[in-house]
Amino acid sequence: MGLKRKNNGDAEEEENDKMKKPNNNNEENARKTVLPSTIKNKEKRSAVYAKLKQQKKIEKRKQTKARDAAEKQAIELGQEPPPRQVPKTIENTREFDETVCKPDDEELFAGNDADEFSSILKQGFTPKILLTTSRFNSTRGPAFISDLLAVIPNSQYYKRGTYDLKKIVEYGRKKDFTSIIVVHTNRREPDGLMIIGLPDGPTAHFKLSNLVLRKDIKNHGNPTGHKPELVLNNFTTRLGHRVGRLIQSLFAQDPEFRGRRVVTFHNQRDFIFFRHHRYIFEAKETKDEDPKSKKSKSEPDAMSIQQKVKTRLQECGPKFTLKLTSLQHGTFDTKSGEYEWVHKPEMDTSRRRFFL
Amino acid sequence: MPRTTTLECPGCPPLRALTFDVLGLIKVIEARDEDNGAPKVVERWGEPDSSKCVLAASFLDREVDPLLAVARTSGMIEVLSPINGDVRVSIRVNDQTDTKPSDDVIVGLHMFKRPRLESVSRLCSLLTCTTRGQVSITNTEVPQKHPNNSSDQTPTTWNVSGSGNVLCAKVDGSENYASFGGKGVEINLWDLQNSRKIFSSKSVTKSSIGIFTPPWFTSATFLSHDDHRKIVAGTNNHQVHLYDISAQRKPVMTFNFRETAIKAVSEDPDGHTIFIGNGSGDLASVDTRTGKLLGCFLGKCSGSIRSIARHPEVPVIASCGLDSYVRLWDVESRQLLSAVFLKQHLNCVVFDSYFDEKVAVNGAQVLPHPEDILEMSDSDEPEVVPVKRKKAAKAESGSKKSKSKRKEKKLKGESDSD
C-alpha cells in the first residue's frame, strides 16, 4: 500500500511539474481568462462580466471598422472588395433533406399531374369552398370566419349545427364543393384549421396561432371583391409541395390584377404565415435636390423631374400563423384514416430539421 | 457552429429489394458491402403514369427464372422479369364489361410457385382477388420474348364474399389455401384445389357496454409457412386477431395496438413473431404465443405503413408506405438500418433473396442482351435459358451461403453487444 501511494505521489508530482512549466509561461494569460461564471461573488462576477462584454463590443467595432476600411480601399484601387460574410441562420444551416424537390424532377411533375388537385388547378374554374366551424363558436370565431370569407373567393359559410363532419364531407361532395375549411375554436379563440380537399383529396390539420383580425390591424384596408393573387413561399420538400398545392387549390387560378390584392402564405421554419395585402404602384414625380443636379437646373425642367415608381403596401384582412400537425390521406376519417405525415415527438431531434 | 444530428445508419447486409409506387414505377434498391451497406436505387422501370398505379405485387423468389407479377389500376396484370424489368406477359383479368375497373380493383395477387397444370411447361398461375370478392386463378404461358396479351386458359373464378369489400387476400406457404377478409367480410379460408370454403370466422361478441363492431379486416397473413391453420388478421379497429381454425371460429387471441387502423401484418419465419404496421406509421413486433409486444421500431416514420416484407434469410425487414420511404430494420435489435427516399407513395415492397453482390456487380456488364439469351435458349437445353446472374453464382453458392451466415452471426453479435 505504502509503496503504491508513494508511486502515486511521484506520478502526481511529475504531472504537476509538467503542468507548471506551461503555466509559468502563460500565467498572466491564465489569470486573464478566468471565466466569470466561476466567480462566486455576484458583484465581482457581474463586474467582470460587464468588463468582458465591453471588451468584446470594442473589438467588434474595431473589426467592422477594419473591414469597412479594407472594402473602401479595395474599391478605390479598383479591386474586387473582399467578400462579405454571410451570417449563419437556422434556415441556411438547415440539415440536409433528401425530400427537397429538385427543379428537374420528372417524377415530381408526373406526381403533380396525378394528384388530387390537378383537376382543379388545371381547369382553371373558381374553386368552391365550404366554410364551417366546430360545434361551439362564438366571439372571435365568427369574426374570423367573416374575414376568411372576404379573403377566399367563392366561399360559403354553413352553420355547423350538430352535423358530423363526415356527413358534411358527403354533402360537399354532392354539391360540387372543392374544399371544406373547418375552423376549430377553443375557449372562444380560434386555434385550429382543417382543410379537406374534395372529393378525395387529403385532409390537413393545422394549429392556428397569433390571430389578428382585420379590425384589430391599424390602418387596415378593406379588400375588394376581386380574385386575389397568391404567393406561396418556401414550400420546398415533397410534403411542402403537397401542402402548397392544397392551399393553392383554395384560390382561383386566374387572379384579377386590377384588384391589386395579394394573399401570402410564407413558410419559415415550418410555420406558415398568412398575410393579406393591397398594393399600389405610385408614380411619384420627384425633383432632384442633390447638389449634383445643379447642373441639370440649367437644362430644361422636364429632365429634372424624375419618374419614380414606388410600391406601397396596405395590410388588410386577418393575419395568422399555421403549423401543420398532420396530413391525412383521403377525407376526414379519424378511425380508419391513413396519415401521409404526422408530427411525432421523436422527430424533434434537431432545431435545424424542417419538414415543409 | 450549428449542432446537426446526422442520421446514424449502421448500414444493412447486402440485399436487393423491389418497390412499387402509385405512379406505376418499379424501383430496385440494392445494398452492397462496398458502400458500407447504404442502399441505393439502382434501377427504375416504367414511366410515371398514374393510371398504372401498382395495387399489388407478387414475387416468385427462386434461383432460376424468377418472376414478378404486378397488378395495376387499369386492371392489367403484368408479369415481369425481376432481373431487367422486361414485361413478359400482360393479362387483363377483369373481363366483366359491366363493372368499371375503378370500381372493382385488384386487392390481392399471388403467383404460384408451381403451375396449377403440370401438363404445360413454362406456365405461370396467378391468383387475383378484387374488392367485390371475385377470385380467379389464371394460367398463362410466359414466353421468353415478345410479350403477348393472351390468356389461353379460361380462368377458374368464384366469389368469396356476398357483400362488403374484400381488402386482403393471402395464399399460404403450401399454396393450397387462401384467406380473404375485408370490410364487412369475415376472415374466410378457401381450399384452392376445389374452390371450397373451409373456414369462416365468427365476429367478436359485443363489448361490455354493448357495442358491436362489424368486421373490417385490413390485412391478414398466415402465421407460419407450412401451417395453414393459424391466421393473423389486423382490423380497422386497431386490433390484431389470431385465428386457429382447428380450435374455434372466434379469435383465440386478440390484442390492441395503438390508436389507428392496422394496415399491414407480416409474419416471421420463426413461426410466432409477427410485425404489424398501422395507419400513423408505427411498426412493432409481437410474439403471438404470449400476445406481448416485443417492441416498436422507432425511426421517425411518419406515414402510414402499406407493406412489410421480411427477408427470408437475413434478419431484416423492409417497410414502406405513404411517407415515400423504404426503411430497412434489423429484426432483433429493432433498429433502423437505413432509409431510402423514393419520392412517391409506395404500395408494396418485396425482397429478392437470391441476390449475390459480386455477380450482380459484374452482371451489370456481363448480362447478355435479351436477344442473346434467346439465341442461347434456342441452342442450349431449356433449363439454362432463363440464365442470369445466378449462373456464375452456382459454383460458389456454398461460399456465398457461409458468407451470409457469417454476416448473420456478425449481426447477432452486434445486437448481443447492444
Image (cartoon, rainbow, N blue to C red):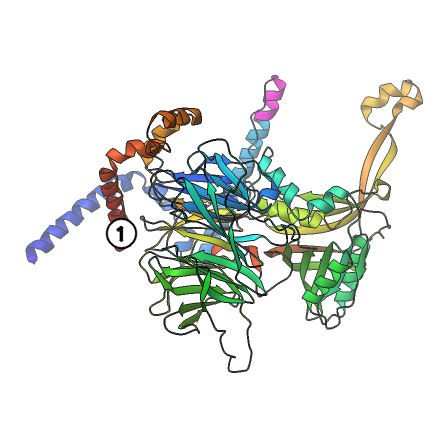
> Label 1: which residue?
B412
B298 left or right, relative to A115: left
Is the stretch drawn in magenta largely helix, strand or loop? helix
Is residue A77 covered in magenta?
A: yes
Residue situated in front as seen by the camera: B225 or A180:
B225
The percent coordinates of residue A134 (x first, y second) are 70, 68
Residue located 36% across and 29% down the image: B363
Does residue A97 appear in the picture of this structure? no
Residue situated in front as seen by the camera: B280 or A62:
B280
| Looking at the image, residue B87 lies above or below residue B54 | above
Residue situated in front as seen by the camera: A137 or B182:
B182
Callout 1, which amino acid?
Lys
| Looking at the image, residue A136 lies above or below residue B123 | below
| Looking at the image, residue B205 lies above or below residue B383 | below
Residue located 65% across and 51% down the image: B100
Residue located 48% across and 73% down the image: B202
Quadrant assignment, res A33: top left
The percent coordinates of residue B105 (x first, y second) are 58, 52
A146 left or right, relative to A202: right
Image quadrant for the C terminus of chain B? bottom left
Point out the stretch of residues depicted in magenta. A70-80
Query: Tag count in the figure?
Result: 1
